[in-house]
Amino acid sequence: MTPSHDRAASAPPAGAGGPATVDVHAHALPMPLLRYLADRGLADLSEVGAGVLLLDPAVSGVPKGARIPLPADQYDVPRRLTALDAAGIDLQLVSAPPFVFGSDSDDGELVMAVTRRSNDALAEYAAAGGGRLAALGTVPVGLPGAAAEAARCLDELGMAGLAMGTYGAGRELDDPVNEDVWALMTERRAFGLVHPSRASAPARLRDFYLVQLLGYPAETALAAARLIFGGVLDRHDPVLCLVHGGGCLPALAPRLALGWERKKEARTVPRSPREYLRRLYFDTAVFDGTALRRLIEDVGHERVLLGTDLPFDLADVDAVAAIRRLALDPAAERAVLAGNAARLIPSVRPDSSARRP
């Protein structure tokens, strides 16, 4: 499929009646999903009251006995809505966290079953949000049925878009098994949130919480580089937003471009990596005003969307205020806070006919 490269570069005008702030990166673990896992011996819910979840490594990808944070907002919709008010967020897109992606599992049937149940539960969770929540369905990348599940999320569950890990079933995102996913997303213009779902060399990162502090940003850059050099962005034109401001990717862009120019092994695509990077989007979850300003300067305000990573402890709890403190041009500020999301995600737009029930 030939990429179209015809997306508009400007956000819709303000005052059109849509939400003023749209958070595209937040997580939820609905209780029906957790009970489903517990009933199958894949989850221990005995410490849920203390905000802790234990998951089988086949599902979570983390070592057995690892205590996964479980803020109540992940399953309690009224608490979530209260938190939205506190954060100044009008509409939040919720996706499953990578702890239920099963990215490192070699049991495809298990991963597909958990993913389908997760998507069903997430759709119900968002529907209970009174119009302030929308869901992104998990795509089980690496599995032959991934595109069919993505289509089910969009068509049967009425989800606002899709979310995917950076690896799955022993396969990278540029593996041929994922071609149907990229073709579907390109054809449907479906918004896709790319979230790190594992870390390379986890043994070296097991101390100091480095899997998430360091491994995740590097994983995002690795996945994006493979999408570029693997030719996925040459064959397809998916709408992809990288979380955590793209991780290490913006800082590495010059090095990737230099490699493409000077190393024959990296000359796998006809254009410089910089050109493909201009087609990607990035959220604002970089946790520092200087870093956020630099991201916007590097990629352009039309490529940056509000993202918080709520309700985890590494979330940007002051994201809306942080964007406003940058004192951007008013049109650029509106674009980052909501306009870009409305441009890319039909159900975010004021036209209610774009939102499926």
Image: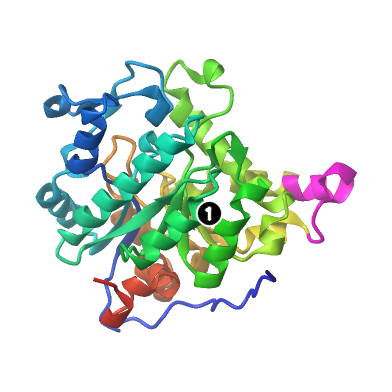
Q: Residue, x 15% and y 57% (percent of image)?
A: 85
Residue 106 is left or right of residue 351, and the answer is right
| Residue closest to the far front | 109
* Residue 158 in which image quadrant: bottom left
User: Is residue 193 visible from the viewing direction of this image?
Assistant: yes
Q: Residue, x 72% and y 49% (percent of image)?
A: 230
Residue 312: image location, x then y, percent? 29, 38
Q: What amino acid is labelled 1 in the image?
A: Leu
Depth order, front residue of 91/41:
41
Quick check: 27 above or below 203?
Answer: below
Q: Secondary structure at mark 1?
A: helix
Q: Which residue is mark 1?
A: 295
Depth order, front residue of 324/255:
255
Q: Residue, x 66% and y 44% (percent of image)?
A: 252
Q: Which residues are magenta?
A: 256-271
Magenta stretch encompasses residue 262: yes
Residue 269: image location, x then y, percent? 79, 56
Residue 100 is left or right of residue 296, and the answer is left
